[in-house]
Amino acid sequence: MELNISKKTILIGLILLAVAAVSFFWIAGIASSEDNFGGTYASLEEKRTNVTELMGATAGSSTAISLLPGDAGTPIADQLADLSGYFLFILAAIYLEKWMVTITGLLTFRIIIPISCLLLIAALIFMNDSLRIVGIKLICFGLIIFAVIPASVVITEKIDESYQASIQQTIEDTRNDSQDIRDTVGDEEDEGVLQQLFNKVKGGVSGQLDKFENTLNRITESIAVLIVTSCAIPVAVLIFFFWLVRLLTGINIDVPKGRLAGKITGRLGKG
C-alpha cells in the first residue's frame, strides 16, 4: 500500500490532531455544560410544567365528572382518562430533549470529532477516499445531533408563546369546573340528593357536561400543539439538517424516515 508522507500531509495531520485535542479537552466541556444552555433548558422546563399541570387538571376533571349523578358523564370521563398516555409520551420526549442537550455535546466533541480527525489523518496517509468520506460523514452527523435540539427549541418558542396563554387558561378553567362540582357535591352520597343539588345549579348536569366537553376539546388541542412542538418539529429539524448537508456536500447520510415516522404514528395510534 502506497503511503503519502509529504510535508503537506504532515502539516494537515498536525492541524487535525490539534483540532481533535481542542475538541476533546476544551470544546467538549463547554458543549456539555448546562450553564451554556440556560435558554434551552428554561424553555423545555416551562413546557414540562405545562404538561404536568395539564395532566393534573385532566385527571381532576375525570374524577370530578364521575361525581355527577347517572352515567351521562362516563364517556367524557373515560376520554379524559385516556389522554394520560399522550401526556406521558410528551413528557418522555421533553426529558429526552433535556438529556440530549448536554449528552450530544459530550458525544460529538469528545468522541465523534476526535475519531473523525483520526480517520481523516489515516485517509491522508493511506490516500483512502473511503476513510475520508466516513470521517466527513461522522463530523456532519455529530454536529447535526448536537445542533438539532437547540435549533428546534428556537423554532418552537414562537409557537409556545402563541399558545401559552391558551394552555394556562385551559388549565385554570378545568380546575375551576372540577372544583365547582366538588363544592356542589360536598359530602352528599345519595344519587337522588345529588340530582336535586345539580338541578339547582344553572344548567344542571347537562350544563356541567357541556363545560367538560369544551374542556376535552381544548385539552385535545393543547396536546396536539405539544406533540408538534415536542416531537414533530425536532424530528423535522433533524431531517432538514441531514438534507441540507447532502445538498451542500453531496454526502448522503441515510435517515430511516419511514421507520421513525412509523414508530411515532404507531405510538399515537395506540393512544
Image (tube, rainbow, N blue to C red):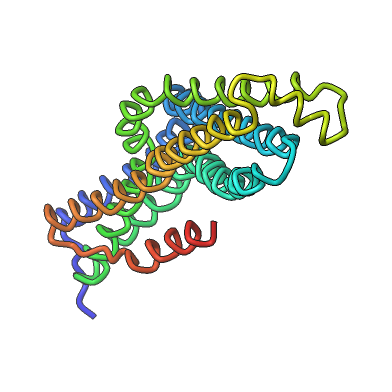
Q: Residue at x 36, y 22 (%)?
A: 161
Which quadrant would residue 87 be assigned to in this image?
top right
Q: Nearer the viewer, residue 166 or 123?
A: 166
| Residue 13 in the figure: left or right of residue 55 | left
Q: Is residue 193 visible?
A: yes
Q: Nearer the viewer, residue 38 or 33?
A: 38
| Residue 188 in the figure: left or right of residue 26 | right
Q: Is residue 105 visible?
A: no
List x then y, in percent, for residue 105: 43, 41
Placement of 11 over or under 6, stated as above or below: above
Q: Residue at x 32, y 43 (%)?
A: 19
Please identify the quadrant where the C terminus is shown: bottom right
Please identify the quadrant where the N terminus is shown: bottom left
Which quadrant would residue 48 be assigned to in this image?
top right
Q: Nearer the viewer, residue 52 or 145?
A: 52
Q: Nearer the viewer, residue 82 or 13?
A: 82
Placement of 36 over or under 143, stated as above or below: above
List x then y, in percent, for residue 66: 73, 39
List x then y, in percent, for residue 180: 68, 20
| Residue 133 in the figure: left or right of residue 175 | left
List x then y, in percent, for residue 229: 38, 39
Q: Residue at x 34, y 24 (%)?
A: 162
